[in-house]
Image (cartoon, helix red, strand yellow):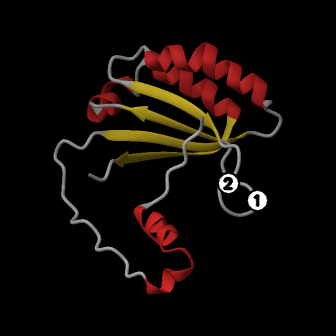
Amino acid sequence: MKWMMMSAAALALAACGDHARDCAPAAAPAVQAEATAQPNLFLLYTLAEGVSPADFERWVVETDYPAMRGLARVQDFRTWRAERLLIGEGSSGVAYIEAFTIPDLDGFIAEDMAGETVQSIMGQFMGFVEAPQFIIASEVK
């Protein structure tokens, strides 16, 4: 079963039903800087022209997952196929989303990025994709 997540504001408005204009917005929680917030790396991209999704996904499962998950600094790595929008018409603008959990991001960037495994995988990856965005993000807590 797929679970969809909604923001607290959307849930509050949904709870108001037809009387949404009568509901006052809830106060936003105080933003706290978390020194222990673990950075993650997200990749958003589309496939290059002529690349078949079946061929790319086979490469992800057979080559990308084992190589990248085998790195000591990569705690978790998953690839998702963007299938549709929850709300609205059209496409999401990306075909795939990857999420890496990398507790030692500085070590990953300084050592693993230049290493043979990442360089080999990145070379292959760039042959499959178009306009990848590499986004470093930390969870809001």
The residue at the far bottom in this view is 22
Relative to 12, 94 lies left or right: right
Local crowd size for mark 1, using a 10 Å CA cut-off: few (<14), some (14–19), many (≥20): few
Q: Position of residue 12 (x, y in %)?
A: 43, 68
Residue at the image position 49 percent from the left and 86 percent from the top? 21
Q: Is residue 108 above or below residue 61?
A: below
- Name the residue located 50 percent from the left edge and 23 percent from the top edge: 119
Nearest to the observer: residue 106 or residue 101:
101
Name the residue beneath numbered marker 2. Answer: 85
| Residue 72, image x, y percentages | 33, 17
Measure how far apart labels 2 and 1 are at the Cα level: 7 Å
Three-letter amino acid code at disc 1? Gly
Mark 2 touches mark 1? (CB < 8 Å): yes
Question: Is residue 13 positioned above or below 2 on the image?
Answer: below
Query: Quick check: 69 left or right of 45?
Result: left
The residue shown at (63%, 33%) is: 126
Does 111 sit left or right of 49 as displayed?
Answer: left
* Residue for point 42% across, 39% down: 41
* Crowdedness near tag 2: few (<14), some (14–19) or many (≥20) residues, C-alpha within 10 Å: few
- Checking the image for residue 90, the label placed there is 1
